[in-house]
Image (cartoon, rainbow, N blue to C red):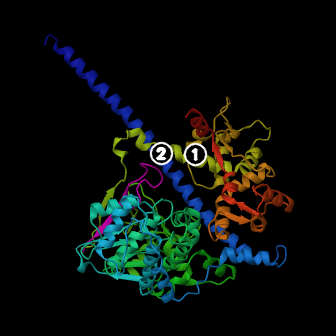
Amino acid sequence: RGCSRSTRVLFHEYSIKAAILIQRWYRRYVARLEMRRRYTWNIFQSIEYAGEQDQLQLSSFFSFMLDNFTHMNGNGPGNKYLISHLLDSVVDPLTEEVRQLKYEQIVVPESYCGPRLSFPLSVTDTNALLSAFKEEQTLHGKYVLQLLYETKKFLKQMPNIIYLSTSYAKEITICGDLHGRLDDLLLIFYKNGLPSAENPYIFNGDFVDRGKKSTEIIIILFAFLLLYPDHMHLNRGNHEDHIMNLRYGFTREVMQKYKTHGREMLQLLQDVFSLLPLATVIDNKVLIVHGGISDKIDLDFLSTVERHKYKYNKMLFKYVLFHMVIICLIQVVDILWSDPKNQSGCSPNSFRGGGCYFGPDVTQALLQKHGLCLLIRSHECKQEGYELCHNGQVITIFSASNYYEEGSNRGAYVKLGPELVPRFFQYQVSRSTRKLTLHQRYSTEGSALRALKEKLYGHRSDLMAAFQQYDIDNTGRISTSEWTQVVESVLRLDLPWRTLRPRLARLGADGNVEYESCFEDISPGEPIPPVTPNLAETLYRYRTDLEIIFNIIDKDHSGQISIEEFRQTWKLFSSHLGVAVNDQTIDDMARSIDFNKDGSIDFNEFLEAFRVVHKLDVKEQQQG
């Protein structure tokens, strides 16, 4: 009260200036966090797509073996046995009736306290499944086999393209990728209601892999499919594929949860996945596919394809090998793998290694050709769970929240009524996200940078050779522009390397990059004695591919393969890669990892030796 008017005015001015300064600081702070969030997202997505490229490179290895195994050590039975293990499915001689009877006769012990299903399924059965999975219970293998068998019978009758109408329901709900995230599926059902005649659903592929609850998800989806066949619809995704499942975890999950019946389940799942419809059309106006389209897609032709013949990438390998242009299989690949782009035209999807990039003109042409107005697809993680592009004619819907890391993205689903106006619903499964600070919500970059550093280590020799071409005087330093050029040319991840450089490599006193500092935070595991550093790096880089090959050879998923199988696999693989490894080194390596000298190799222990160790992890473990 005693302050003069001029003092009050001055205080008011200072307050305004302080508020402006705080506001400017906060805006810059949020802008920096947003920049970090964006490059973190780019790292996650680039590494994910690079993994899919590796998957298709593995395809070329299978083709190489088909073409070359008779020239590798002659035409011996060992080679033929290996190839048959890698590429041939197990043929079940049982008739459908005998197989059904076999499943019915499986004894369920009295000690089993999970759901007991009876076919045809009822609402009681689906409710029991949901309750059991919420309580972390496992459905007995007998019921899983019966469920898969009934699903296979049902899907055999279904067309390639499902046609639905909103006139029979108020709205249809479309969900995108779930990738083994059971909590997301349960949250969708909690928010939106269970599938029923009044509440129909379309799940647009990629139910499995990556997450830990893929088995539970397909059990729930298939159970509702059988319960409400006219109101529950499943499109195939690119992860409904045997070889993809070997790389991304679903095969391992099934074998861990069902050691007795797992192998038979996987065989049935190959058939079930190959029989899933490829597309759904609502009111003859909205097309729903998992990946996208290309300028080759013709829905009338696609409806005639024998989709069950595209069981997994093996079919494509064989056709490519014999130089046959199989239009139907190309269209299936485009449907499952393609992504939209902003530029006009259609081009190969080099980033994923399969399918196409399709522009707005390609979308417009296909919609006009078939009298459609909208394309809904999934296949790409979006930070908000959905995204519109191509002037609103393409919707991407992705339903797995926290896909890359806790807090990395929301999940979403979309509802369509008779007016065909999309309504989006977002969510995020997390017990802790609401409690995170602003900095913590943006702070998933640690995991992304760790993954990127592992990528750098896997290409260390190539990077060092390229760095040294610029470092003529062997100073250990090159310019920032030279460093970014080398890293992009070797890794080809299309990342903002100049922005990332401070997080990956340090500068010297002269302002140049000390390029060997890229590898300081990581070190190799404890390699096997006969393995040279260069071979260890090669093994690390291709350890996922080797794991897939070993898992295919290991038909009973025991984790053991014979020494001879190991030798033959590695000889073929090293020949395919052009890696100079003599037979003696391979034999020494095989003997050294036969720890108990029983003629078998625990390949999981072998692969564990070829991983990188983050020094920060070691320090945390020592402190803990």
Q: Is residue 390 left or right of residue 548?
A: left
Relative placement, left or right, of 64 versus 178 is right
Q: Nearer the viewer, residue 35 or 169?
A: 169
Residue 422 position in % (x across, y down) = 29, 67
In percent of width and height, residue 623 lies at 57, 32
Quarter residue 278 falls in? bottom left
What label does residue 444 carry, if any?
A: 2
Say which quadrant the N terminus sits in: top left
Element class at badge 2: loop
Residue designated by label 1: 450
Give the residue at the far top of this rendering.
2
Span colored in magenta: 399-417
What secondary structure characterizes most of the magenta part? loop
Give the camera-side residue of 554 and 156. 554
Residue 580 appears anywhere in the view: no
State the residue at coordinates (59%, 40%): 617
